[in-house]
Amino acid sequence: MKIAIITDQHFGARKNSKLFHDYFLKFYNDVFFPTLEEYGITTVVDMGDTFDSRKGIDFSALSWAKNNYYDRLQEMGVKVHTIVGNHTAYYKNTNQVNAVDLLLREYDNVTVYSDPTEVMLGKLPVLFIPWINQENEDNTFKLIEKTTCSCAMGHLELQGFRVNNQIVMEHGLESKLFGKFTKVYSGHYHTRSDNGVVYYLGNPYEMFWNDVNDTRGFHIFDTEKLIHEPINNPFRLFYNIYYEDTNYQTFDTREYENKIVKIIVRKKTDIKKFEKFIDKLYTAGVAELKIVENFAIQESENFEVFESEDTLSILNRYIEEAEIKLDKSIIQKVIQEIYQEACELV
């Protein structure tokens, strides 16, 4: 039996941005649903963070998710197993109040898992592991210890895996706790990363600058062979353009329509030509344009910011290189949470 695994869809992201949802929809219309039809998929496992904000949902975002995703899956007769993630749990210490359970009760093809549960996918028993918190931690570890399932799927925060291309998570649970399983699949981190047993499958699309040039999509999982096949999303939203006295007349701007673009200036000897280059991008219909010419941090002459780095990566590396006698991983985690909440307000 072949099933689809998708995770961290974050419906309602960026304050229910139309730009982002139009970008999401192209993935679902041109990649996700055609692949389900091609493979004859009748089961989808959603490994968490289906909606973006744990505090609430914009009615327009909910309508979008139902019209463009859940209604279509119901019409196709697809069974959806939805695991509660940290973004869909309202409280940080319990999963019992969660967005997917409250918002999707009208769908008889959707089952929500807020507690660890053994589930049959075809002939394969799989342990579903929702977001681990204070309330369910003991029961989760006990079930992991006694289960006979060879495969687990969940929303886990483990050490040693990539959060993005620049950062490796230094806190969280140790992956050896899941060593009894043949395969462990998880959401939560948006980039793909694995150690041969635990696989972070990554989310379907770009959402922040640290996602640029990072392969996204979803996966087809064979429950008999215990192998997964990536189905990549060919569509991008974020673009870096490196300007080095680039000829604006021959520069092709067509792919940047409705995209978020950052121009990183390496060489600029003619201001007028540079302005014409910028005007050409605006004429092409870019959604957002940022120009970067100087990354210098005045407070530290020894700290160099690299052109490819995003804000969160810069902050994390700055903390890592700072001479402070504190647990830097805790500080980085706090900064990451604040940054993510700030992004939700943008």
Image (spheres, grey):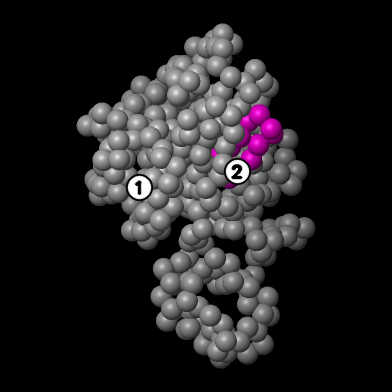
Disc 2 is placed on an element classified as: loop
Out of 334 and 262, give the one closest to the viewer. Answer: 262
Look at mark 1 in the image and give the residue it sits on: 12
Vertically, is 96 above or below 312? above
Give how far across and how far down residue 98 sits, in percent.
Answer: 34, 29
Q: CA distance from mark 2 to mark 1?
A: 22 Å
Disc with the residue nearer the chain's start (2 vs 1)? 1
Determine if the magenta segment contains residue 191. Answer: yes
- Please state if 221 lies on the left or on the right of 16 as rendered: right
Look at mark 2 in the image and give the residue it sits on: 192
Q: Which residue lies most toward the right here?
A: 302
Question: On the image, which quarter does residue 173 sit in?
Answer: top right
Q: Is residue 221 visible from the viewing direction of this image?
A: yes
Give how far across and how far down residue 3 sits, in percent.
Answer: 46, 34
- Dot 1 alpha-carbon crowd within 10 angstroms: few under 14, some 14 to 19, many 20 or more: many
Q: Which residues are magenta?
A: 190-201
Residue name at image x 39 percent, y 23 percent: 113
Q: Which residue lies most toward the left here?
A: 106
Question: On the image, which quarter does residue 327 sit in?
Answer: top right
